[in-house]
Image (cartoon, rainbow, N blue to C red):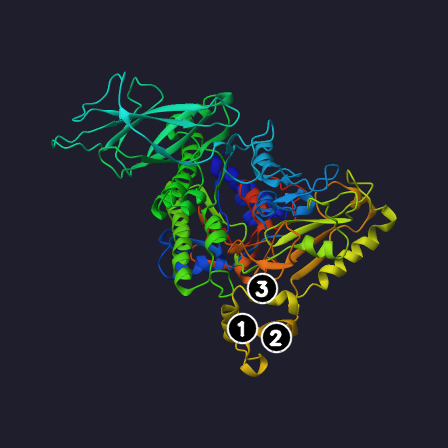
Amino acid sequence: MTTRLARVLVLVFFILAGFSQEAVFAETNNKQVILISFDGMRNDLMRRYVKEGKLPHIKKVFKNGTIAKYSTTISPSLTAPSHAAIATGASPLKTSVVSNVWQQSGASLTNKKDAFLTRPEVDPLWLEAKQQGKTTATIAFPGAVPQKGKEADYTVYYGETWSPSNNDKLTFRKASNWRNTPKSYSTPKESELHIEMKNKKNQTYYVLAIDTTNDKKINYKKFIVSKTKELNQEDKAINPGNWGSISIPVKDGQTAGFWYRFSLGDEKLEKETEMYRTAVTSGRIDGPDHFKKEVKDRFGFFPVEADDTAFEKGWITRKEYEQISERFVEWVTDVSLFIKKEYNPDLVILYAPQIDHQEHRYLMSDPRQPGYSPEKSKKYQNYIEWSYRVADTVVGKTVKSLDKNDILFIVSDHGMEPAHSMLEPNKVLKDEGLLVLDEKGNVDPKKTKAIAIPSGSAAHVYINLDSREKSGIVPQKNYKKVRDEVIKAFKDEKIKRTEGSKVVSHYAKEMWDSLTNEGLTLSSIKEDTKDMTGYITNREVHLYEEVRILHKSEKAIKKDNHEGDILLMAAPGYIMGNGASESVKPSPELGTHGGNPYREKLKAVFMAAGSDIEKGKQIKPVSNLDIAPTVYNLLGLKTPSFVEGKRIKGLIDK
């Protein structure tokens, strides 16, 4: 029987059996799927930048691929639960990844579990596909933590921070006892760099300064950082302002390291010289025996993601800050494409965080935000635009690497909203007598009936149930009564006259301008700005837009699935904090997410390109829950029963 005839018979069999042509296509073709998640990429901002010609590579995906009108994620719209939904096709009730942090039953009432180091309760794409005979790879993807037997075939993830960044001030003196030093036209000088390491012996490095300019002047413009005073080929000389790097062996065969640069204010080195270095970081790499060494030899250590502290303290310029972030994204992208090319996995999943990172810090677009000015808003918008352009570069590199059997998915976990105020839900619980603080201001678990654990614009409220919590005091019979008290407290929480004055006092004029810009007339607003809070009270702005009961049955109440008993989601413009001192205060962050995922600025992106993907097409809105079942279909795999999403229709041109 010829191969062609066999294929025809298989096709006829499936059609007669009632299978769609698209399902047959998935069953009979060997595809490679590459999925990139850009944390925080907003659907509306991405489209605006494409329209303005600022994202040429993504624009080509528009032209040569298929894009959804938008994508929505789950509630709460936070990074960890949203990525768990992308990876599994299941909602938080099944994945148990309910927030970025949560209170774990059986532990202290105030304990917080980090979701990014926790794998979903149901198997993610990379594990299910692996179990069905496919080869998979994950690079920096949230939740893809290397765990024995539970990781992809090739896994790269965030490791440890061994030492924070620093801006050292070095004093130079005449060098002595160096070997193999380059020629210097002035007497070489030396200094020492000391790094305090976490859980490891502190590190000392020697710094050699040389004068390589034969101009009969003393000007030290080359620096060499070395572990010993005997130089070798790995000890590179760098100019001030340029970057150098140092690798440090750490535990279990891992390699950590840092990047550094010198700022030269005194060419004779008679004064202190500044040496900035990034944090010392390492990655967690898992795969075949040779894989870890290959990554290390080709790409070096896992670099730091960003350094906001250094930028805020003036240790580095904005340009240098961007170079640090770009280095991280480039490292992740290059490692991913290396794995794709060298090992040919069926599924490659990678992650880029820079958009989310910039939006949290610099999304200033609402006059009610603390410190708002048109000039600062414009400056900060350039920072955010830069992060989208970095994403565009990643897309360009990845598209260039595609071959005829590859399919590229570009997704995001959520969007981002501007934040002007911070809520403290535990203040509400304290005012109602449901949360009690001791003399030191700490939560008293022996008197507290409920506590809120916030993250972003969402918070889970946990009732201190005696049959569930370590120091529980609420009897099972009183559970519903306490729950109803909590619900009423948050549903009644509005901007009141006294609270409003606290908020408005920080930026009264900006809020006034914002209210008038909404089309309100002076007849509906008191002209005296000092009395603006009367208008706000009349509007009855509900601070907690949604107060949702999560547990309904006694069995569910007792189950340790990480969810709180009540989910709070803030109104637009509000972020939630951990304190219990004020109901409303100025927001410490300018961007937030976690609220209702159907709000315009929280909508995510979905687009696809590559083998047999329809070109220049826009399809209906999709859900992040739909991504996993679509990948299963394209790889010809069985979709697990726990998947709640549906295969995305209209992608394949067949």
Q: Which residue is mark 3?
A: 503
Q: Residue furthest right?
A: 477
Count of numbered badges drawn on the protein: 3
Q: Label for residue 515?
A: 1
Q: Which residue is mark 2?
A: 535
Q: For this rendering, which residue is in front, 186 or 258? A: 186
- How far across and down, in percent of the image, does residue 91 sit? 65, 48
**Residue 167 visible, this angle:** yes
Classed neighbour count for the residue bearing mark 1: other residues with Cα under 10 Å, few (<14), some (14–19), many (≥20): some
285 in relation to 121, above or below: above
Indicate the secondary structure of the residue bearing disc 2. Answer: helix
Indicate the secondary structure of the residue bearing disc 3. Answer: helix
Q: For this rendering, which residue is in front, 627 or 546? A: 546
Give the foreground label among 2 and 1: 2
Mark 2 is on which residue type? Answer: Tyr
Horizontal side of residue 483 vs 589, given as left or right: right
Q: Label for residue 569?
A: none
